[in-house]
Amino acid sequence: RAEKHNPTRHLNEYTSLDFEMGFIDSFTDIMEMETGVLKYIMELLKTEYAPEVELLKADIPQIDKIPCIRFKDAKELCVKKLKNITDMKDFEPEEEAFLGKWAKQQYGSDFLFVTHYPSEKRPFYAMDDPEDPKLALSFDLLFRGLEITTGGQRIHDYQEQMDKLAARKMNAELFESFTMLHKYGMPPHGGLGIGLERLTMQLCGLDNVRKACLFPRDRTRLEP
C-alpha cells in the first residue's frame, strides 16, 4: 500500500487475512463469521500455543459477543469527550483509542464493531444502505482501540455497480473484468480483511506494528 507516512500503525507491505462469503442475508453475517473466527483463534492460542503465549507475554482476550455501534453514534461520543475533532467522516487514531476504552468500560469487551460508515469513505464496490444511501453497509472492527478489520457487504447487482462507478466519475471500462461477474450473475456477498500484524501488535502489547513483522517494509526500509 502506498502510504506517504511512517506512523506506528502502518506498513507498506502487510499480511491480510481475507475472506469473502456468498449468499449472505446481511452484512452482519460477515461480522458474525469474523466473531467466530476470532473466538477460534484465541482459543487455539490459549491451548495449542500456550508456551509461545507465555514467552511473548501476550494478553489473549476472552470473546463472547462483540458489541456494535453505528459510526454516527460513535462519532458523537468522540465529539463529546475529545477536543479538536475536525474529520466527521472518519476516525483519527485518538478517537479509535477512546472508543476502545469506552467499549471496555461499557461492555467489558476488547473488541468493538463500528458500522454504517459514510459511503464516500468506502470503496466503490461497497453496498449502500437502502434506507440511507449516504451510508454503506460496512464496518470496521476495533481491537483495544486500533482498527484491525474493514469489511462489509459488496454490490452484487450489475446496474447498481455501474451507477455507482458513474456517480464517482470512474471509468467503467477499466473495471470490465470485475463488472462482468455482476453482469452474468453474482449472489449477495461480502467479506473483510484482517491486518495480521496489527492483530499481533495488540495481542502482544507492542508500541509499533513493525515489531510484529519479521521483515517490515516501509518507505525507508526495503530490504532484507
Image (spheres, rainbow, N blue to C red):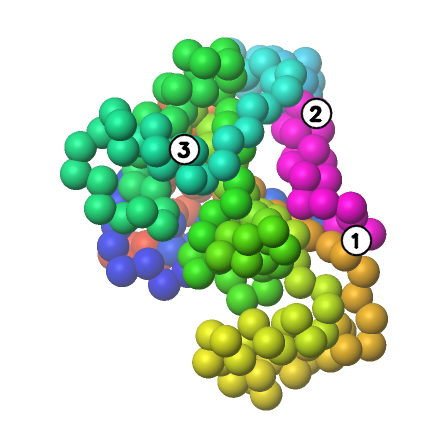
Q: Disc 3 marks which residue?
A: 74
Q: Residues within 10 Å of mark 3 (few under 14, many from 20)?
A: some
Would residue 206 be found to the left or right of residue 117 on screen?
A: left
Identify the disc placed on residue 22.
1
Nearest the camera: 86 or 31? 86
Range covered by the magenta-colored residues: 21-41
Query: Residue 55 in the image: x percent, y percent?
Result: 48, 15
- Amino acid, disc 1: Gly
Identify the disc placed on residue 202.
none
Is-magenta flag for residue 162? no
Quadrant location, the N terminus: bottom left
Query: Residue 140 in the image: x percent, y percent?
Result: 50, 41
Would residue 181 be found to the left or right of residue 133 on screen?
A: right
Nearest the camera: 37 or 123? 123
Query: Residue 135 in the image: x percent, y percent?
Result: 51, 52
Nearest the camera: 144 or 189? 189
- Amino acid, disc 2: Tyr
Q: Residues within 10 Å of mark 2 (few under 14, many from 20)?
A: few
Q: Give the label, 3 or 2, closer to the camera.
A: 3
Q: Give the label, 1 or 3, closer to the camera.
A: 3
Rendering quarter of residue 84 = top left
Q: Disc 2 marks which residue?
A: 40
Earlier residue among tags 1 and 3 = 1
Is-magenta flag for residue 25? yes
**Separation of residues labelled 1 and 3 (CA atoms):** 29 Å
Q: Is residue 200 visible?
A: no
